[in-house]
Amino acid sequence: MKAMMAWLGGLGLALATLNCQAGSLDLNLSDEAVQFAASGEVAPGIAVGGGLLDSEDRVDTQAVHAEVLGVERTRRYDIGVGARWTQLDTDAGDGGGLGLGGYGYAYVPQVPALSLGGYGFYTPGVVSAGDLERSLEYGLRARYGVTRNVDAYVGYRRLRADLDRPGGTRTLDSGAHAGVRLVF
């Protein structure tokens, strides 16, 4: 039931971004996880977004996040920096926290449709709640513009959390994935 509520929340977020100036819908899959994300610019250079991850990699994990980022896109790069609230519901503990981080991609001049980069968000204990003491999520991706509005990519993601339960720091999700991003 929790997973169904998370998916409905993600769908609502995706529909809310349709009124934004520019935005994206993103879906990626691995053999043990699925992630959906949506984002949109609410003003020039300010993007809001969110997403959800359902993983059975190491520990049954549902992670929902909402973020506000300052963004800039040019023909050479695509970057965003800001804050993200992540709420975790896992078999190892539940909790949430406010993390800082962002993303950055550089376009390869010899292959303009190709961009390489990644993202990362760190949540320290001072802004965490529930069982969460701290967390770190990061990922790397190689994106290729299949059409003007569609990117296909391969990547690697790792989500680690220090939970206030026996076992301490745990990897909740890690591994390679493939995805598609619709840009509008």
Image (tube, helix red, strand yellow):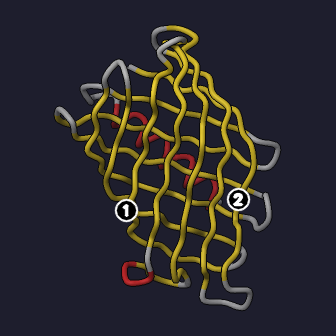
Q: CA distance from mark 1 to mark 2?
A: 19 Å
State the residue at coordinates (53%, 8%): 147
Sequence-first tag of 1 and 2:
1
Judged from the image, the secondary structure of the residue bearing numbered disc 2 is strand
* Residue at x 36% of width, y 38% of height: 79
Residue 95 to residue 148: above or below: below
**Residue 84: x, y in percent?**
38, 59
Secondary structure of the residue carrying numbered label 1:
strand
Q: What is the x, y in percent for residue 132?
A: 53, 80
Q: Which amino acid lies under the numbered mark 1 shown in the image of this protein?
A: Leu
Q: Residue furthest front?
A: 110
Point out the image quarter for the C terminus.
top left
**Which numbered marker is on residue 89?**
none
Q: Amino acid under label 2?
A: Asp
Q: Is residue 45 left or right of residue 74?
A: left
User: Viewer-nearest of labels 1 and 2?
Assistant: 1
Q: Quadrant of residue 154?
A: top right
Taking the image as shown, residue 148 lies to the left or right of residue 1, namely left
Q: Is residue 114 left or right of residue 20?
A: right
Viewer-side residue, 170 vs 62: 170
Residue underneath mark 2: 173
Q: Residues within 10 Å of mark 1 (few under 14, many from 20)?
A: some
On screen, residue 86 above or below 143 = below
- Look at mark 1 in the image and give the residue it sits on: 100
